[in-house]
Amino acid sequence: MAECHPVAFRWVMKARERGATIIHVDPRFTRTSAVANIHVPIRAGSDIAFLGGIVRYIIENERYFKDYVVNYTNAPAIIGDEFRDTEDLDGLFSGWQEKQGSYNTRTWMYKDVDPEPAAGERESEAGGKNEPIQRQPIQSRHTDPSLQHPKSVFQVLKRHFSRYTPEIVEAACGVPKHLFLKVAKTLCDNSGRDKTGAFCYAVGWTQHSVGVQYIRTAAIIQLLLGNIGRPGGGIMALRGHASIQGSTDIPTLYNLLPGYLPMPKAKHDQDLKTYLKLNESPSGWWGEFPKYFVSLMKAWFGRAATNENDWCYDYLPTLTGDHSHMNTVVDMADGVVKGYFVMGENPVVGSMNGALQRKGLRQLEWLVVRDFQLTETADFWSEAPEIQNGEIRPKEIGTEVFFFPAAAHTEKDGSFTNTQRLLQWHHKAVEPKGDCRSDLDFVFKLGQRIKKLYENDYDQPRNRPIRDLTWEYPTQGRLNEPSAESVLHEINGYTVADRKPVEGFTSLKDDGSTACGCWIYSGCYRDGVNMTARRKPHWQQNWIAPEWAWAWPHNRRILYNRASADPSGEPWSEAKRLVWWDEQKGEWVGEDDPDFVVKRSPSHRPSKDARGKDTISGTDPFIMQADGKGWIYAATGLQDGPLPTHYEPEESVIRNPLYSQQCNPGRMEWRRGDNPYHRPYDDPRFPYVLTTYRLTEHHTAGGMSRWLGWLSELQPEMFCEVSPELAAERGLSNGGWATIRTLRAEIEARVLVTERIRPLRIQGRVVHQIGLPYHWSSKGLVRGDAANELIGFVADPNVSIQESKALTATIEAGRRSKGRRHVTSGPLVRQIDPLDWQRDLPPARNKPQAAHGIKAAEIKEGNV
């Protein structure tokens, strides 16, 4: 956090000055480690084993916050008799479908309950006649508050993690038993009625084939310890850019509409009635779903959206499959995708398998790039490694590239949504130079041109969405740019009759009388005031600082803060006082805006015929869940298991020490000749663990920092971090050159021999790790090979995120060969047998998910 999020880390340091304990778990000793009370070196890719050991420690030593767990989590819920755990099936859960490479999740349900989507998960199944199935709400019908029933979530959890002993943690992670126990005890000692602990994580936890389950394990720990919804608790996702949170909220994700509303699925959502039926939860706050969807459609299509035409529902595109980044790139390479917009990204450097990224770009008809300067993605046709070694000639590339210079954040108005969901407005400081323009200006004027093309075309119904799209934003200034505040006004929402801003999301209606561009942001422009631009000093308000900018939803700074009070509505302790029930006022009050139904008393219990938010009792803090509980056990919503399980990365140096199932069985793979994998464990060609990371002095793929003299001087060259022991083993010298190689590519880097990255002893052997920053490439004031050239396409099955934080590689002294930098053809590819990695494993224990890529049997010999 100090290395990659130094501004936010300021507050961690202030907490330490007040006595807080900082524990840093990381393969490397970094700036964070230097100020931490405890640093834990760990093997990259083994975090679930480490966290699972903490879960076991909490349960075995009865350190869990029992009153919190019994009342606010689903620990008492009884699971159906058909469920089988990884303990029963040696690393698999019940419902595994070998041929499909995926789970049928029905056996994971509570007893006598049919599945229904969880909060944020909006998939549905089809019946035999391709008719959608309406399912019962995910609320447990059978519970045991004593937590003793053998099929209760608590007992299933206890058994599931029983094998995650300190000895197993040491065998999987390389963390000595005494150090692990110190961490577990410290965390428990700092949790309870009077104390809380927080988890902060970044892409070191997410970029794995089990990335979602990493965070799930942390959530289980925090729920057991009572650290969710309380001051100083929670789990904070440290975002790698100023507005990554905003980009998922509004969003840039292929399968969501703004505010985490689901995109319609072509297979199921044939009409609005079906779409609403499958996504409006019968219980919990998602019962309000129609209000948010209808208001969104009114914001987008205005007068054209009416009740009679289902609010223009049929204007929306429908999903026909997984269109996430890696699948899109593969489709580009295979000639399916013809055009590609790249705005503020540099996938050739920042994404995995650079050679496959560039192959995709070469197959396009057109490419649009918007950035501050020509990036490697924009210039892929002239400076790529394939061009330099003569394998590809520029005149053979038919892609037409359009480059648009972009304005910097200092040259435009707008907002950032940061890691704590805080919207902060930034004002334009200077006018952009030359032809540079903001993203808002580019998209707005592109939309104007497209609308003009279709303004008189009434023959094709498919053109109506373009014609009817509301696109009236006032322009201003010398450049005639659209007003960013007018967009914020639309996002906030307004009453259609008079366009007055609504007070918040509770004011939205499903009758077409309100419009709102993103329901969770509703209230950010309340009363016509730009709430995100507020800058009231903290000493003039309470410690929550509610008048500094604005946080979604409804300016709540801590989500699920009803959990900061006990079931009767009293704070768990004065030290952690946040919100509470005021009997005289008959409402929830406190330091923060209550994240609860304000007038609902702790004694309230819903009637049997209640629906939607009326099903939330006075003791159900987690209002976005259908049952109001924090989910220790995920009965639905995940593709790879209801409980986190330790699986090794796609490429590992060891066998899985817990199960014979080596890797996540549901992981996404792309088994292609241009995306080869190593053997799953102990491949003698690639004996070392490799992990990538970010430096303070550079920013992501380097597009904003490699052109700046001050930053480039501080970190002038691509390097690799190795331990003195690994340097001696491989003949590496500090400051000399090294070549790092995988089956995908080889790169060169300067050698930094340092004790900051240490060898680990795992299962009786020494395991070495190589650290690579990922900021360099062929352009800028400082240059070097790109680390992500080495990484293959493999992903988490829940969110399709790449596995780039744990893989295997080899390293040798000297510079790389000029003609063998990447894998598209040539001797290196001909050495690959794409099936050899399967031969060492029982076939039923490592069959990957084939639906997302090419089946191994379908790989043509010519591609190998």
Image (cartoon, rainbow, N blue to C red):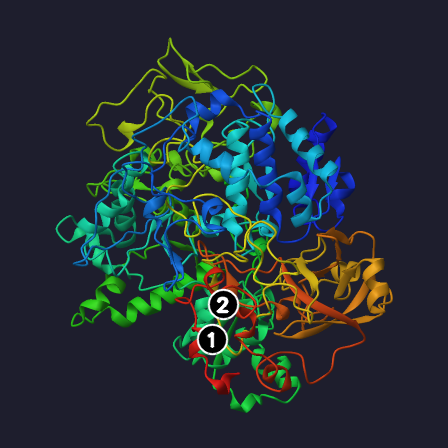
CA neighbours of label 2 inside 10 A, class few (<14), some (14 to 19), many (20+): some
Task: Provide the residue designation for mark 1.
Answer: 367
Which comes before the other along the chain, label 2 or label 1? 2
Q: Is residue 134 above or below residue 654?
A: above
CA neighbours of label 1 inside 10 A, class few (<14), some (14 to 19), many (20+): some
Q: Secondary structure at mark 2?
A: strand
> Residue 739 at what x, y percent from top left?
75, 73
Q: Residue at x 47, y 58 (%)?
A: 665
Q: Residue at x 44, y 24 (%)?
A: 70
Q: Do tag 2 and tag 1 residues touch (Cβ < 8 Å)? A: yes
Q: Residue at x 32, y 52 (%)?
A: 123
Seen in the image, is 38 located left or right of residue 792? right
Task: Provide the residue designation for mark 2.
Answer: 342
Q: Quadrant of residue 450?
A: bottom left
Q: Nearer the viewer, residue 319 or 407?
A: 319
Q: Secondary structure at mark 1?
A: strand
Seen in the image, is 798 located left or right of residue 115? right
> Residue 300 at what x, y percent from top left?
29, 53
Q: Is residue 571 above or below residue 593?
A: above
- The answer to whether any part of residue 534 appears in the image is no
> Residue 400 at what x, y percent from top left?
47, 81
| Kind of residue at badge 2 | Val
| Kind of residue at badge 1 | Leu
- The answer to whether any part of residue 329 appears in the image is yes
> Residue 527 at what x, y percent from top left?
37, 34
Q: Quadrant of the N terminus?
A: top right
Q: Quadrant of residue 734?
A: bottom right
Seen in the image, is 115 located left or right of residue 666? left
**What label does residue 216 carry, if any?**
none
Cα–Cα span, label 2 and label 1: 8 Å
Seen in the image, is 86 located left or right of residue 258? right
Q: Nearer the viewer, residue 90 or 620?
A: 90
